[in-house]
Amino acid sequence: MVRSANILLIADGCCPSLIIYNDPFAQYYLPFSFSRIFCWSEGLSSMRILYSILSSIIATFFISAYAAPPRNLDLVQRGDLPAWIQGEVDNPSFFIKKDKEAFCESQYLMLSCSASSNRISAKQLRNVKLGERLPVGGQNNFAVYSLKGYGYGLRFRSSNLIMKVFNTVNNAAIGEAKALNAVGDLVASGTVKALGSKPAIIMRKKPGQPLYETQAYKAAREIVREKMRNQTYGLMCNEISTVATKTYVLHDDNNPANILVTMDGNAVKSVALVDYGPPQTYFVSKSVTKADVSKYCGCEYPSSKRYVWEHEFPYVTPPPRT
Ligand SMILES: *[C@@H]1O[C@H](CO)[C@@H](O)[C@H](O)[C@H]1NC(C)=O
């Protein structure tokens, strides 16, 4: 890590090079003065070319020596995770060039970009018509917005879209965009000028609402609610294992707010999974089976995982008597 970060120094800020495959975030943890040492030549084009050639040669050497993607993701806190879970979606060893460009255009082939960097141009999301700011929180989120439209000629129907805005471009934002893209929910990513060029993702809006917010659930007696939770868990398990075996993304952050349901009377008709950001969103091995996921999620009835999900969330509380 230190070694590759040091190499990146040469490229950081001034010198186009092939070092793009190294950690793009080195600029955040390396002392500023270090990167300046190598950047005194900014503006001198002949020196830039010289640096470019030099660093390309050095980079080629180090890439072949050190850049083989680690398969044992020791950055992940594995705990009791089964072997088919490869790692959290924000683990940078999953990222390829395209992933790192989610919010920035690469200039000079450099990918150490952040929306605020003046050396890298932000990849602007054009024709974004902001709707209202939605009351959704999150660790890395700046905000979530509904949209009144997006794209040239506002080609996407606003009712089908939602936009999540991040504070900064980091591994979590890149990982979430990558996971959303894998599951087919990503519409676009980039920065939003109207929001101070903050990075954002536009995604498909999923139908439904959390079970505990539906009229049917609110109005039901506890015995009926129990059945609804049970149905939700079964459908959720099915959806998680389908998504995992088709797209190799495991949605493991299954708190009830992230599971949207549509109802047909008192029956839970369908579920949709939202929030593919870390933590608890994983890339999984291509050899994963539905049985693996089902076992991991405690999908069988009864199971302790299932019991906890169905009984320990606040929405279990009965409605106030009227
Ligand atoms: C919950 O669902 C399972 C099947 O998923 C079923 O076997 C069980 O009887 C249900 N329990 C209740 C209380 O509805």
Image: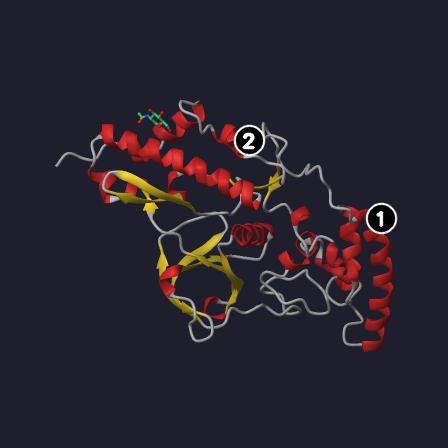
Side (left or right) of 48 relative to 204? right
How busy is the neighbourhood of tag 1: few (under 14 within 10 Å), some, or many (20 plus)?
few
- Which tag is nearer the camera, tag 2 or tag 1? 2
| Identity of the residue drawn at 46% across and 66% down | 195
Amino acid bearing label 1? Ala
Q: Percent from the top left, x then y, of residue 138?
A: 45, 48
- Work out whether 242 lies above or below 158: above
First along the sequence among labels 2 and 1 = 1
Label 2 residue SS: helix
Amino acid type, label 2 = Asp
Check disc 1 and report its element: helix, strand or loop: helix
Tag 2 near tag 1, CB within 8 Å: no
> CA gap, disc 2 to disc 1?
36 Å
Residue under the image location 84 percent in, 48 percent down:
65
> Which percent across, then down, holds residue 224?
24, 31
- Residue 220 visible to the viewer: yes
**Residue at the image position 58 percent from the left and 64 percent from the top:** 115
Tell me the residue that label 1 is attached to. Answer: 65
Residue 319 image label: none
